[in-house]
Image (cartoon, grey):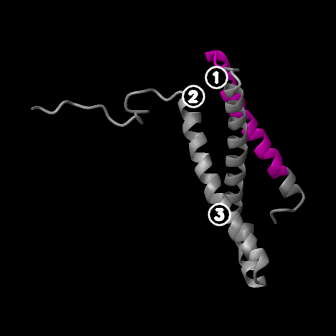
Amino acid sequence: MPTRERPLSPFMIGQVYKPQITSVLSILHRATGVALAVGALGFAAWLLAVAGTADAFECFRWFLASWLGKAALFAFTACLMYHLFNGLRHLAWDAGWGFEIPTVYKSGYAVVILTILVTAAIWVCALGLGGAA
């Protein structure tokens, strides 16, 4: 019996479907969830270092003060803000609000704009107070 040509995996963005804000934000929501889980492990390691020796804490302090550490903290902050705002958007959907296509697009752009603004505000405050020095 000849083998029929079967469809590819459901992830066909770019191959079959044109990326839309809805699909991109959905993928980002999942990716930021994974990033937050990894960041939570880093936070737990930091707590262990705080409770542990002074050398362990100093090692973490040195890393977080480096450019790579600041970039990781910035990325974690951006992931946290995006996941928060997009989660609120999903809660609105669970309540039955916002399913109209124009509203879906407006709320998607609002999530992106709020993520950028709030992440920037957090970092301006943190750097202004010397928290990441």
Extreme residue toward the right, this view: 129
Magenta span covers which residues? 99-124
| Front position in the image: 96 or 61 | 96
User: Which residue is label 3 attached to?
Assistant: 41
Tell me the SS state at disc 2: helix
Position of 84 relative to 51 (above/below):
above
**Callouts 3 and 2 close, C-beta under 8 Å:** no
Name the spot of residue 100 as percent of width and height, x first: 64, 15
> Is residue 8 at all visible to an observer of this figure?
yes
Q: Residue at x 73, y 34 (%)?
A: 88
Mark 3 or mark 1: which comes first in sequence? 3
Q: Main secondary structure of the magenta part?
A: helix
**Callouts 2 and 1 close, C-beta under 8 Å:** yes
Name the spot of residue 71 as percent of width and height, x first: 68, 58
User: Which residue is label 1 attached to?
Assistant: 105
Query: Which one is in front in this view, the residue at disc 3 or the one at disc 1?
Result: 3
Q: Residue at x 72, y 51 (%)?
A: 77
CA gap, disc 3 to disc 2? 29 Å
